[in-house]
Amino acid sequence: MTIQTALLQGRQLLEASNIPAPRLTAEVLLAHAVGCQRAWLFAHSDEELREVWWIHYGRYLHERLKGKPTQHITGVQEFYGREFRVTPDVLIPRPETEHVIEAALPLKARRVVDIGTGSGAIAITLALETGARVVGTDVSGAALKVAAVNGRALGAEVAWLACDLGGALQSGGFNLVVSNPPYIAASERAGLEREVREFEPDVALFGGEDGLAIYRRLVPEAERLLTPGGWLVMELGHTSAEAVANMLRAWNDFRIHTDLAGLPRVVIAKRC
């Protein structure tokens, strides 16, 4: 069997099971099985598939057909042009979260805390892009281990701290608080994609019955952590913009950034 045939068969299997992006998924899984970049597959499409490649590729396809996310099979996900290690202990970084980075960069903060850092994608990216002193907190020790691995691999100097929100941090020590908090309502669990519902950590997904529980705690916590004039930047859930806006009524320079689909994605507010 050639590489080209293997890709075709993999795509057909994934299509038949309604797996999103079947062609891309087949390419990523075969590249992972071979240990190469996707471009190599196209340059060697007529090459015979080695037995060990086929064994790994078949196993990866089977795992994906059972709902396991591609990122958990390959162990990596790209975010803001960098490759991050991911495991079932952390939320898989989404392209939409890059809007948090784009909102934070113009603020030129020198002391930053990323609340609920997970894989460390936001904290590490801001540390590398700005040179700021960055702290990443998470209630999950397992998530912090993943974040620390990513920080070392990418050469980012970030301090990792296990605590609930910013509970172990002193008041008034930061110019910027950033967060991608859990914002899915518990009532929405059944409607989530299988890949999300069964394979990503609940603590990183669900924000109480209405999806707003963490926002209610995070807004006053950010006010405590920020210096006067400091900034809060948070990712928004698809239905949370109005409620979060009400929580930030007493803050200055409140604004919402939309994503490419025109949906509210990031909220920015300045501490009085």
Image: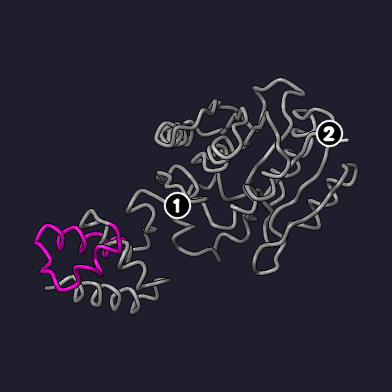
User: Does the magenta-highlighted stretch encompass residue 45?
Assistant: yes
Picture residue at 10% right of the left edge, 69% below the top: 48
Where residue 73 appears, as percent x and y from the top left, is 32, 54
Q: Magenta part mainly helix, strand or loop?
A: helix
Mark 1 burial class by Cα count in 10 Å: few <14, some 14-19, many 20+ = some
| Mark 2 to mark 1 CA distance (whole Å) | 33 Å
Can you name the residue that lies furthest to the top here?
170
Where residue 227 appears, as percent x and y from the top left, is 80, 27
Q: Is residue 224 above or below residue 245?
A: above
Q: 211 or 148: nearer the eye? A: 148
- Write down the residue under mark 2: 229
The magenta stretch spans which residues? 37-63
Where residue 18 appears, as percent x and y from the top left, is 40, 76
Q: Is residue 106 above or below residue 16?
A: above
- What scheme was used to colour the molecule? one colour
- Image quadrant in which the N terminus is located: bottom left
Of callouts 2 and 1, which one flags the residue occurring earlier in the amino acid sequence?
1
Q: Secondary structure at mark 2?
A: strand
Picture residue at 49% right of the left edge, 64% below the top: 193
Q: Is mark 2 in CB contact (under 8 Å) with mark 1? A: no
Image side of residue 108 versus residue 251, left or right: left
Mark 2 burial class by Cα count in 10 Å: few <14, some 14-19, many 20+ = some
Q: Secondary structure at mark 1?
A: strand
Q: Amino acid at mark 2?
A: Gly
Where residue 117 appears, as percent x and y from the top left, is 56, 38
Picture residue at 44% right of the left edge, 42% below the top: 89
- Write down the residue under mark 1: 78
Picture residue at 76% right of the left edge, 57% below the top: 241
Q: Amino acid at mark 1?
A: Glu
Q: 254 or 238: nearer the eye? A: 254
User: Does the magenta-highlighted stretch encompass residue 110?
Assistant: no
